Image (spheres, grey):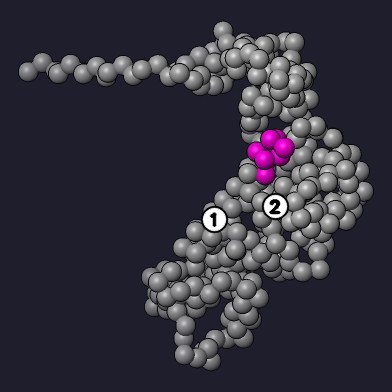
Amino acid sequence: MPPKKKQKLEKLDKPTLHTCNKTSFAKAFLPNYHQRLRDYIAIIHQLADHASHALKFYILSAPTFPTVNEDTIEAILYLLNKGEAWQPRMDAKKAIRGCLLPYVQWYCQIVGFFHPNLRGEQQSINYLTASMMTNLKVNVQEHFMMMLLRYINLRLDVKGRKGQLPPKSDARKAFFTRLRYLKSVFLFDIVPESLDDLTAEESELLEEIWTLNLPFPDQDKLLAYLIAIDAMSFFPAYCWLSSLYEKHGFRWFSAIPLPRSLIQSHIRIDSKILYQHILCITQREAEAVEKVDLWLHVCNLRTKAFRSR
């Protein structure tokens, strides 16, 4: 029998919005606005870079481990952008400003950071705050459990001891049986009636894990599940775990993503940012024309960057 012909897929309706394909900056945007775009992107990168460092500086310098949430990151970004000139109206934000201002000023003095004073920054800082917060959450969700298990292995020298045991031997099987038991105790999967069977080394490791102040899991919810659904409640523990790595001379890791992972791989520019920072026109002038006409001033829609796929 001759092979069946491939059925043609029904053509989908053309999208009403453009999708962005990879192309050069110079081709995608009209030359009149290249410099304004580059200046705006540079400021956003600068704020993202220093905000991650300032956040780490704040956590390390505060007398007790501080609360870190969207409001904290937002305040750091505003203070980096404007310094003391940032005067929020809400009482809650005023309180956060008062707490963070000395630390951000101290950070700026140490690194010689000058405030870029980006005007009309609310929209840009909203995007940056959301991006940084997502980055922190994902970092904890993806790496905390892995780094905790790795720490247990390093402290118990699992790799070294495993190499000393013959493959498929009873001693090797007993070693891994004991290791699984210890990990279930360290991660609160089980609660033994007595800890008398732990060696001095194992007891010390258990005490170190207790110092992380991990939320005690319910019987029906394992630690890994709690990390997945409420990552930021484990953020302090993740930072302390990083310090334990440093204390014992293990390879360091960054609990707070630093510039390489935090600097924006893309910059979000909406119509408001476009008319405020790129076109430099008023809201009234922007609303007097269609949005597509605003973008036509900046984007070269004839290039492949804006062709529908």
Residue at point 79% right, 61% down?
A: 60
Q: In terms of secondary structure, where does tag 2 sit?
A: helix
Mark 1, other Cα within 10 Å: few <14 / some 14–19 / many ≥20: many
Q: Quadrant of the C terminus?
A: top left
Residue 125 lies within the magenta run: yes
Q: Position of residue 122 (x, y in %)?
A: 72, 37
Residue at point 7% right, 18% down?
A: 1
Q: Is the magenta stretch mostly helix, strand or loop?
A: helix
Viewer-proximal residue among 26 and 197: 26
Q: For the image shown, how many numbered marks are present on the structure?
A: 2
Q: What residue type is labelled 2?
A: Asp
Vertical position of residue 62 compared to residue 130: above or below: below
Vertical position of residue 154 compared to residue 272: above or below: below
Asked which quadrant contains residue 275, the reply is top right
Q: Where is residue 149 in the image (x, y as percent from the top left)?
A: 54, 65
Residue 138 lies within the magenta run: no
**Which region shows up in magenta?**
122-129
Residue 141, can we see it?
yes
Q: Position of residue 153 (x, y in %)?
A: 56, 68
Residue at point 65% right, 38% down?
A: 127
- Mark 1, residue position: 141
Q: Which amino acid does label 1 sit on?
A: Gln
- Which badge, 1 or 2, is on the more N-terminal residue? 2
Asked which quadrant contains residue 166, the reply is bottom left
Asked which quadrant contains residue 140, the reply is bottom right
Mark 2, other Cα within 10 Å: few <14 / some 14–19 / many ≥20: some
Circle number at residue 290: none
* Residue 61 horizontal side relative to residue 221, left or right: right
Q: In terms of secondary structure, where does tag 1 sit?
A: helix
- Mark 2, residue position: 71
